[in-house]
Image (cartoon, helix red, strand yellow):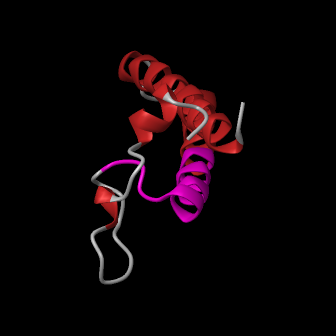
Amino acid sequence: MNEQMTLLQNIAAIDFAMQELRLFLDTHPTDTTGIALFNKYQQKHSALVTEYTRSYGPLDWNTPNTGNTWQWVKNPWPWEAMANPEV
C-alpha cells in the first residue's frame, strides 16, 4: 500500500471514530472523557487532511484552495486513487 492510500485509510478511520463519538455525545453531552477524545481525534483529523492536501491536493471540494488555480480539478481524484492504488 502506498503512502497516499495509507493517509486516506487513516483519515477514514478517524472519520469513523469521530462519527461514533458524535452519536455518543448526542446522548451523553456532559461526558468529559468523550469530549476530550473527540477533540483529540478532531486535531488528528485536521493534521492528516493538511498532510494529504499538501502532498496530493484537496481531499474534497470544501478543502481551502491555495494559489490562483482551482486545485479540486487536478487528477487523480481522491476516489480514483482509492480505486487505482498504482496511480
Q: Residue furthest bottom?
A: 68
* Residue 15 appears in the picture as rendered: no
The residue nearer to you, when weighing 46 against 28, is 46
Residue 24 appears left or right of 48: left
* Residue 34 location, quadrant: top right
81 or 60: nearer the eye?
81
Whether 13 is drawn above or below 59: the answer is above
Q: Quadrant of the C terminus?
A: top right
Nearest the eye: 20 or 35:
20
Assess whether residue 45 is covered by the magenta stretch.
yes
Q: Residue at x 47, y 19 (%)?
A: 20
**Rendered location of residue 6, percent (x, y):** 67, 35
Residue 17 picture location, percent across and down: 55, 24
Residue at 37% x, 82% y is: 67
Residue 32, picture quadrant? top right
Q: Is residue 58 above or below residue 15?
A: below
* 30 and 34: which is toward the camera: 34
The residue that appears at 31% across and 58% down in the rendered structure is: 72
Quarter of the N terminus within the rendering: top right
Which secondary structure class fits the magenta region best? Answer: helix
Q: Find out whether residue 64 is within the magenta segment.
A: no
Provide the residue span drawn in magenta. 44-60
- In the rendering, at what x and y percent does residue 21 appear? 49, 24
Quadrant position of residue 77: top left
